[in-house]
Image: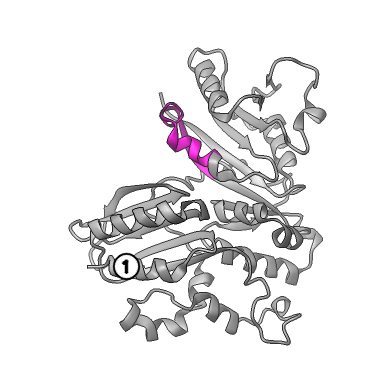
Amino acid sequence: MSLIPATILTGFLGSGKTTLLKRVLTEAHGQKIAVIENEFGEENIDNEILVADTQENIIQMSNGCICCTIRDDLRTTLQDLAEKKRKGELQFDRVVIETTGLADPGPVAQTFFMDDEVAEQYLLDSILTLVDAKHAAQQLNDRQEARRQVGFADQIFISKADLVGRDELDALTHRLKHMNPRAPMRPVHFGEVALSEVFDLHGFNLNAKLDIDPDFLKADTEHDHAHEDQHHGHEHDHDHEHGEHCNHPSHQHGHQGHGHHHHHDDDVKSFVYRATRPFNPARLEDFLGAIVQVYGPRMLRYKGVLDMQGTERKVIFQGVHQLMGSDLGPAWTEGEPRVSKMVFIGLDLPRDILVQGLDQSLV
């Protein structure tokens, strides 16, 4: 039996999660979807489209979708659903888990890897984060949970983009890219986003694609060559450079025109490491193992496509918090430069320690 794809939907209060869910639950899209709602949701879907007084916590919609609220923990709910599906009591093709607006999606994602029974039945497809353009700046300033949700995302949807000006939207996109350069982001109107853009994104698969926003990498090319010899071409002063060469108007106010980003203080940050020499597998494993032990709770998402000594194939690794997995990918092709690339997203991660340790893990 094939695995049931699961999507974690997270996002700021008022960012449109309920609108998106209602659409998923009521539209005739031909897919049977089970939505798992965290009961403590600030805006419960039930009140509007479901009969609230039912004792049953699984409700079948007219289009064949299912909505259920979590009364116990997520693990039990997922196992119950899978069992009912196996017995033919429930029909559904995929699961969407809505986390409450203030939740950290990390533990939800970890459930899919840590629990064998869940891992044998479900495949985590991606974490989607909805960002409300109108209130984003305030929410990102005030709430660490909002910043963490951005760091975790495989895909970011920006809602209410029509309510803000072009400059404000640019500044927001810029800020989000600093926190998470690996998640594609786009403005959406929830009545109109195609479900194909919401599901089967394979954001969690160990695939050989490491999509890092090209602008994020560009910011630093002028300094890259200078570093090439001493630092194997990985981006060293990334944030710094971005600040100096960046003249987004929105980043200047309040800074006496220094042009430094005023949001450099976001605690969720990302950086990219590149190396042109291969890694020594044992040294790298020791180093990453040690780092994850110490900084795991602050590491939100990290991923790499690596050149390892002793194999002609790319090695792909990724992780959430303390959980890390790796796999052999496709072979390096003829003439392809064998460059290792990693992206780390986390809360005030010690960039220098990471860079130094990675440098020392090279052959």
Quadrant (top left/top right/bottom left/bottom right) for the C terminus:
bottom left
Q: Look at 56% across and 19% down and name the residue there.
A: 91
Query: Does the rendering let one see residue 196?
Result: yes
Image quarter of residue 231: bottom left
Q: Using residue 15 as the reference point, say whether residue 268 is left or right of it.
A: left
Chief SS of the magenta region? helix
Q: Amino acid at mark 1?
A: Val
Q: Look at 48% across and 49% down and name the residue there.
A: 321
Q: Position of residue 258 (x, y in %)?
A: 67, 86
Instruction: Give 85 or 180, whichever is nearer the viewer.
Output: 180
Q: Position of residue 29 (x, y in %)?
A: 64, 32
Image quarter of residue 248: bottom right
Mark 1, residues whose alpha carbon is within 10 Å: few (<14), some, or many (≥20)?
Answer: some
Instruction: Give 91 or 226, whichever is nearer the viewer.
Output: 226
Under tag 1, what secondary structure? loop
Query: Does the rendering let one see residue 197?
Result: no
Q: Look at 58% across and 65% down and name the residue there.
A: 177
* Residue occupied by mark 1: 339
Q: Position of residue 83 (x, y in %)?
A: 50, 17
Q: How is the image coloured?
A: one colour
Q: Using residue 272 as the reference point, say whether residue 179 is left or right of it.
A: right
Q: Is residue 114 magenta?
A: yes
Q: Using residue 115 as the reference point, say whether residue 317 is left or right of it.
A: left
Q: Using residue 353 as the reference point, say whether residue 71 is left or right of it.
A: right
Q: Taking 257 as reference, is 104 above or below it?
A: above
Magenta span covers which residues? 108-126
Q: Is residue 161 magenta?
A: no
Q: Position of residue 317 (x, y in %)?
A: 36, 52
